[in-house]
Image: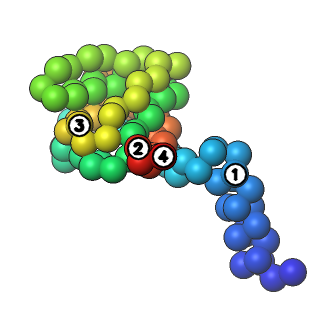
Amino acid sequence: MTPLTRSADRTARAASATHGAALTFETLVEGEPVAARIRPYEDTLLRVIAGIVRLTIDARERLLGAGDEVVVPAGAPHSLASAGGEARLVTGFRSALR
């Protein structure tokens, strides 16, 4: 088995384990500009791993700490920023058309 094949195999198992969601890890640094986001066809799951995240959805702001989760519905404009120091989060996307 080539390294490429082993890598693809791990990816397939990971996708199965997340029920089709694509997961990414992000680090936000206080003061860094972050562009607004919108995912028209995918719900977005955000889970804060460390720090404090300022989440704005449809012009409503809330603070999320380590362990907090929120689902941003498909089509909702939102933005993320660190509310102090460095913040880390896991972001997952899954089609809202299921």
Label 2 neighbourhood size at 10 Å, few (<14), some (14-19), many (20+)? some
Q: What's under tag 1, amino acid-wise?
A: Ser
Mark 1 or 2: in front is 2
Say whether disc 3 or disc 4 marks the residue closer to the N-terminus. Answer: 3
Q: State whether residue 26 appears in this view.
A: no
Q: State the CA–CA distance, disc 3 to disc 2.
A: 12 Å
Q: State the CA–CA distance, disc 1 to disc 2.
A: 17 Å
Mark 1 or 4: in front is 4
Callout 1–callout 4 Cβ contact below 8 Å: no
Q: Which label sits on residue 16?
A: 1
For residue 4, side relative to residue 25 (left or right): right
Q: State the CA–CA distance, disc 1 to disc 4.
A: 15 Å
Q: Between 22 and 25, which is closer to the camera in this rendering? A: 22
Q: Between 21 and 79, which is closer to the camera in this rendering? A: 21
Extreme residue toward the right, this view:
1
Q: State whether residue 61 appears in this view.
A: yes
Q: What's under tag 2, amino acid-wise?
A: Ala
Q: State the CA–CA distance, disc 3 to disc 1.
A: 27 Å
Q: Which label sits on residue 76?
A: 3
Q: Position of residue 89 (x, y in %)?
A: 46, 35
Per the image, label 3 sits on a secondary structure element best described as loop
Residue that numbered label 2 is attached to:
96
Name which residue lies at 43% across and 32% down: 46
Q: Position of residue 4 (x, y in %)?
A: 72, 78
Say whether disc 3 or disc 2 marks the residue closer to the N-terminus. Answer: 3
Mark 3 or 2: in front is 2
Name which residue lies at 79% across and 71% down: 6
